[in-house]
Image (cartoon, grey):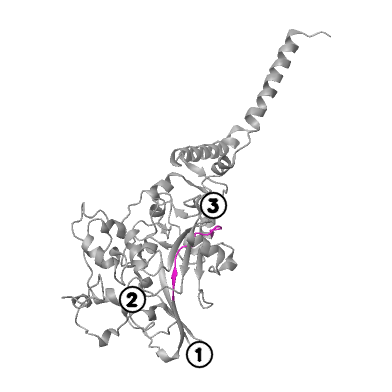
Amino acid sequence: MSCSRRDFLKDAAGAAFVSSLPLSAFVVLTTDEAKAAVANATVRWGYLVDTNKCTGCGMCVKACKNENEIPYDAPVTRTWVERYVVTKDGTTHIDSPNGGRDGFTSDKIRDEEIDPDTIAKAFFVPKLCNQCDNPACVQVCPVGATYKTEDGVVLIDREWCIGCGYCIMACPYGVRFFHPEHKVADKCNFCYHRITKGMMPACVESCAFGARRLANLRDPDDPVTKIITTERVAVLKDEYGTKPHVFYLGLDNNVR
Amino acid sequence: MKRHVLHPLWVALGVLGLILFARLLMVPDDFGVHGDSFTYNFYRLGSVEDWKNFPVKYQGTDTCVECHKDNSRTHRRSPHKKVQCENCHGPAGNHPDDVEYLPLNKERSMCLRCHADLGYPASTARSNLPAIVDRHHKRRRECVSCHNPHDPREDVE
């Protein structure tokens, strides 16, 4: 058997390449390394609203507007509280004056007196952005100015938004609005600047009754996550397939 | 084929080239897909930092307690203990560094947010709070002129 110098060098180079492969190509990850490889898999923000506890004081709306620099007297808000009064004849009366910013201090609903004896049930429902897993608002954005972060919060890039308003139309929950000062779309982002610093959103912090709570759904030991996973919670407009991540305890059929 | 037939083509290619060049200049480097979904994760990465750097205004009761020990001691023992300071005193912001005094809202409407009687059934959380009918209870006076907001069980001297 003869072997030219050229053949020898070729085979040697090939062998060196193959022998180097297993080291670089077949790395077995430890559990921690695998977790780290899936970016930020340790956090997925969710939210729990306990409508049984809400008293309609509106402190959350006030705090939200102050914290997030939403013009206080403009008819826009990132979160709001709705009042539902169901009378015994089956009629539902709904209002949310100023988004509930000043609370509900009058028993009149849209200037209508309702006799307390005819009321079957009454309750308050706080609303905010649902930080959907399939956000319709993000799908329709023509410029990539709104997006979902790795921890599940839908944000708006104020420098990139052109203010076309498609997302405002697309949101089934009506949580988006046009910011009167920045001239871009705006909505609740769970106070992203606070939750990324380990603080609670302004609305959660200001709720004296524990009706609003934040959860890290990836942490099975999180007390709020435990409630969401073990108790009977509901989401708004499930039929839209947006997979909302704001969960409600004690949600009534009249809530839309 | 005569060369003038191709002139519109060169113009069109030139315009396309200009658009691509302008796009190169205008789209930031960090714009792209950051995540596993082109639909949901197509964005400018710097925007996330922009939001993280948004200034915090509500500092939380734990911050207030550091200096205002007397009032916080009263407040901590009272039925109002879950109402955070900044709900009534307003957001602290950089207090006391740049704002020395926080404006205090003493209006009746502040207290009525929780303590107005709306006449709802007991199943409503609101109905479990002590409540007044605004027009029947000392109409012209501020609530805090009689009730101590830090501990409503105490009367004001």
Q: Marks 1 and 2: same chain?
A: no
Q: Please tell me which of labels 2 and 3 falls first in the chain.
A: 3
Which amino acid is tagged 1? Asp
- Mark 2 in CB contact with mark 3 (< 8 angstroms): no
Which amino acid is tagged 3? Tyr
Mark 2 is surrounded, within 10 Å at the Cα level, by few (under 14), some (14 to 19) or many (20 or more) other residues, namely many
Rendered location of residue A9, percent (x, y): 71, 12
- Farthest residue to the right: give it: A1
Chain for numbered disc 3: B
- Where does label 3 land, which residue? B40
Q: Is residue B142 above or below residue A235?
A: below
Stretch in magenta: A124-135
Tell which of A239 and B24 is nearer to you.
A239
Chain for numbered disc 1: A
Q: Is residue A66 left or right of residue A186?
A: left
User: Image point 57% across, 47% down: which residue?
Assistant: B36
